Amino acid sequence: MQKPQESSSQNGEHFSYSSIHVDGPYIAMTFDDGPHATLTPRLLDILKERHIKVTFFVLGQLVKEHPEIVQRAVAEGHEIGNHSWDHKALNKLGPDGLQHELTDTSAVIKEATGKPVTLMRPPYGATNPRLSRAIEKDFGMKVILWSVDPLDWKDPGPKVVESRILSGSKESGGAKPGAIILSHDIHKGTVEAMPSTLDALLAKGYKFVTVSELLAMESKMPVQSSATPAAPTSH
């Protein structure tokens, strides 16, 4: 897969965010495509044991089925972002389709959690500067991509997922300060990889924050933003 291409923002305006310049060993773990009925609660247990906070980019149709899972996630300090209603490529939709995918998803998240939604991750990373600006200005959400992709949706096994997050792969670099790390809590192998992966990152001195917290830490250095979408994948 092709990771999101990064370029500096134009006239100080960010199209979207793949990583953040921070002064310190801060990273954001993110999990897409849930909530899953059994795997997401298992992941929440793993995170709770380590006092780690993450950001979940969820599908509206699954939040409707399992509102109690996102309620638990928020109660335990995690952040919930919009990942569309049913994982359609947003750059191929008309205005009505976009409205449904984004507005209805944010509404069902707010109904479940009582909190407004401020972050959005486009399925497949499929966006462009015009669409990303519209998502922020018309729907009130910043577009969040990623800088680390373990390709866990291909189910390579827990050890490979761990290695790719820690050290990187041909398609993506590994964890470093300011990284936004992509994973999927709907895959058993990903959740199985998390205890050793998170422990290894903690041992390296990394501190876990939500994406919003990472954005708030942005240093004065030029921030990397994505002006070109990733090639469609299974994200």
Image (tube, helix red, strand yellow):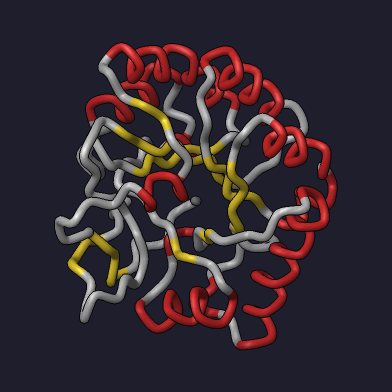
Q: Quick check: 56 above or below 45?
A: below
Q: Left or right? Give the position of 161 relative to 82.
A: left
- The residue at the point 32 percent across, 34 percent down is 26
Viewer-closest of 138 and 185: 138
Left or right? Give the position of 26 relative to 28: left
- Where residue 138 sits, quadrant-wise, is bottom right
Q: Is residue 108 above or below residue 209?
A: below
Residue 120 position (above or below residue 135):
above
Give percent across and percent down for residue 232: 42, 61
> Looking at the image, which is closer to me, 193 or 201?
201
In the drawing, does residue 75 fall left or right of residue 156?
right
Up the image or down, 235 lies above or below 205; here it is below
| Residue drawn at (67%, 27%) of the image | 39
Residue 32 position, x and y percent, is 55, 45
For image coordinates 31% across by 71% down, the residue present is 14
In the current view of this chain or complex, which residue is farthest to the left? 221
Q: Say which residue appears at 62% left-offset and 88% top-offset.
A: 95
Closer-to-camera residue (28/156) = 28
